[in-house]
Amino acid sequence: MSLRITFITAGRILRQLLNDHRTVGLILAVPALIIALISAIMDEAPQVFDKTGLILLAAFPFMLMFMITSITLLRERTGGTLERLMTTPTAKLDLVVGYALAFGTAAAAQTAVAATVAFAFLGLDTQGPTWAVFLICIVTSLLGMALGLFVSAFATTEFQAIQFMPVIVVPQLFLCGLIWPADQMAGWLQGVSDALPLTYAVKALTEVQLNPDVTADMWADLAVVFGAVVVATVLGAATLRRRTN
């Protein structure tokens, strides 16, 4: 692995993102605005907002990083950029880590803006430290990035890449505990929920919400999410191969 090539890859992806002002707006502004809307809707139930708003801080990076990564990688595949890179000494790990750094930086900026709005202006409150919330949200965003990297290999158009969201992203949002507590779902759905990595991100956030100190359960849940990131990244790296049209 070459750190120089890794940082060059990360810088190239970040420049592409910065040159797309709509994408920058999508990443930075939209999550904070929607969380503000949820806060207004739940104005009479601040305790409900504390739980829902906290989960959304992780759900948005997960969802948006999946969408942006899958589309970006698809463009690089169909545009020939990836094929040209794979004919150079650039290793797969250089590319994958470069993408992770770039999208992780974008997710960190998104989390910083959304969390600042939520905690400073919307009254979001947790018993635990805010740095733990940031850490969980960033790892969750890397999960979205890794899954987007993987599914981009199975799409030939941007429309097809978006169609993977109802298959990969939406079920996790429904079953992670955002809409309804997982332990109150049908038994077989609880089993499905336990198999989905986003569920463990929500469990980790719940630990931060309820406990003033960082708990072993939070670290265990976060380790599951990070393990899913590693698995999805390895599967995604396996699809990075030279393709000739």
Image (cartoon, helix red, strand yellow):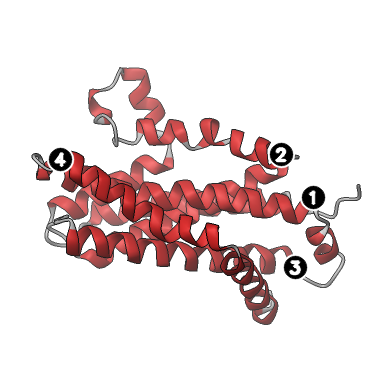
Residue type pointed to by label 1: Thr
Residue type pointed to by label 2: Ala
**Tag 2 secondary structure:** loop
Distance, label 3 to label 4, CA atoms, is 47 Å
Nearer the observer: mark 3 or 4; the answer is: 4
Q: Taking 138 as reference, is 95 left or right?
A: right
Distance, label 4 to label 1, CA atoms, is 44 Å
- Give the residue drawn at x 34%, y 64%: 113
Expressed as whole percent of the image width and height from the top left, the position of residue 186 reads 30, 17
Image quarter in which the N terminus is found: bottom right
Distance, label 3 to label 1, CA atoms, is 19 Å
The numbered dot on residue 155 is 2
User: Dividing the picture into quarters, in which one does residue 128 lie?
Assistant: bottom left
Q: Are marks 3 and 4 in contact (CB under 8 Å)?
A: no
> Of marks 2 and 4, which one's residue comes earlier in the chain?
4
Can residue 55 be seen here? The reply is yes
User: In the rendered image, which residue does mark 1 sit on?
Assistant: 78
Q: Taking 47 as reference, is 177 left or right?
A: right
User: Dividing the picture into quarters, in which one does residue 161 lie?
Assistant: top right
**Tag 4 secondary structure:** helix
Q: Residues within 10 Å of mark 2 (few under 14, many from 20)?
A: some
Q: Taking 78 as reference, is 15 left or right?
A: left
User: Dividing the picture into quarters, in which one does residue 170 lie?
Assistant: top left
